[in-house]
């Protein structure tokens, strides 16, 4: 059985968490403003369209 260096494991875990956070920020902040606004507008249009298709009881 090979000994485990806890410092290396701690640093690996910190790197993985940092990478996860960086990926989330890349999605959140990496999109150009125009594209973000376009997606929001498309989503709003889709929501209003679906609301119009609902059957009232």
Image (spheres, grey):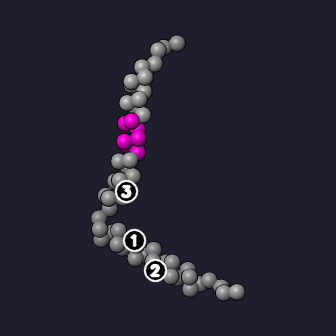
- Residue tagged 2: 45
Task: Please name whichever residue, 43 or 3, is drawn nearer the observer in this view of the structure.
Answer: 3
Magenta stretch in the rendered image: 14-20
Residue at the (55%, 80%) spot, across then down: 50
Residue at the (45%, 74%) spot, across then down: 43
Question: Residue 46 location in percent, x, y?
Answer: 49, 77
Location of residue 33 (image quadrant) = bottom left
- Residue 33 in the image: above or below residue 23: below
Location of residue 13 (image quadrant) = top left
Residue 39, label in figure: 1
Q: Secondary structure at mark 2?
A: helix
Q: Earlier along the polypeptide chain: callout 3 or callout 1?
A: 3
Left or right: 49 in relation to 5 = right
Q: CA distance from mark 3 to mark 1?
A: 13 Å
- Residue 47 in the image: above or below residue 6: below
Q: Earlier along the polypeptide chain: callout 2 or callout 1?
A: 1
Residue at the (40%, 76%) spot, across then down: 41
Question: Residue 51 location in percent, x, y?
Answer: 56, 82
Cβ atoms under marks 3 and 1 closer than 8 Å: no
Residue at the (37%, 36%) spot, across then down: 15
Question: Residue 47 location in percent, x, y?
Answer: 51, 78
Categorize mark 1 by other alpha carbons within 10 Å: few (<14), some (14-19), many (20+). few
Location of residue 37 (image quadrant) = bottom left
Q: CA distance from mark 2 to mark 3?
A: 22 Å
- Residue tagged 3: 27
- Residue 1 in the image: above or below residue 42: above
Q: Secondary structure at mark 3?
A: helix
């Amino acid at each position: 059985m090979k000994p485990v260096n806890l410092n290396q494991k701690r640093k690996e875990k910190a790197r993985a968490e940092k990478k996860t956070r960086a990926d989330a920020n890349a999605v959140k902040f990496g999109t150009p403003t125009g594209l973000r606004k376009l997606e929001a507008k498309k989503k709003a249009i889709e929501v209003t369209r679906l609301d119009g298709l609902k059957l009232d009881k």
